[in-house]
Image (cartoon, rainbow, N blue to C red):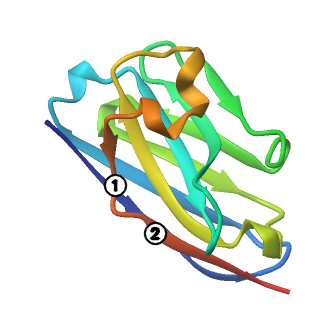
Amino acid sequence: QVQLVESGGGLVQAGGSLRLSCAASGNIFSINAMGWFRQAPGKEREFVAAISWSGGTSDHADSVKGRFTISRDNAKNTFYLQMNGLKPEDTAVYYCAGNYIWSSGRKDPGAYKYWGQGTQVTVSS
C-alpha cells in the first residue's frame, strides 16, 4: 500500500502562485509514476501533470504548460506542483496520484491506483 498526502492549497488572487506538495509513504518503491489531477465542481477529473519517479520525465497538460511545473524530491519521497500565473479557471480540488508504471495512460485518472485526499485551490479574480 501507498499513502499520499497533499498540502499547500489555499486562496490566491489571479496571477499569484502556490506550491502543492504530495508526501508519499508506504511501499513507495513500487511507484514509478506520480500525477496531479484536478476536479472543478460539476466537471470531470482532469489531468494536470505527471512525472516519472525514477527518470524525471514529465508531462503537462496544454492548459498549464508554461505556468505549472511538476517536480520531485526522491530523498523526501515528495513531489510538487509549482503553480504560477494562476487563473480563476484553475480553481478546483487538486489530487495527487500514484501508479506502478510510466505509460501512455498517464493522463487517464483511471490508470492510477493510489490517490490523496485532495486539496482545494481557489483563485479569485
Q: Which mark is residue 119?
A: 2
Please tell me how crowded label 1 is: few (under 14), some (14-19), or many (20+) other residues with Cα within 10 Å: many
Relative horizontal placement of residue 62, taking residue 38 as reference (left or right): right
Q: Is residue 24 above or below residue 89?
A: above
User: Disc 1 versus disc 2: distance between alpha carbons?
Assistant: 9 Å
Where residue 125 appears, x then y in whole percent? Answer: 86, 87
The one of 102 and 105 positioned closer to us in this rendering: 105
Q: Quadrant of residue 12?
A: bottom right
Q: Residue at x 68, y 28 (%)?
A: 59
Q: Identify whether 22 is placed above or below 26.
A: below
Q: Closest to the observer: 26 or 111? A: 111
Q: Residue at x 81, y 50 (%)?
A: 67
Q: Say what amino acid the circle numbered 2 marks.
A: Thr
Secondary structure at badge 2 equals: strand
Whether pointer 1 and pointer 2 mark residues with C-beta atoms closer than 8 Å, the reply is yes
- Give whichever of 52, 106 is nearer the camera: 106
Amino acid at dot 1: Gly
Residue indicated by mark 1: 116
Q: Position of residue 18 (x, y in %)?
A: 64, 66
Above-or-below relation of 103 to 4: above
Give the residue at x 31% y 24%. Answer: 31
Residue 12 bears which disc, if any? none
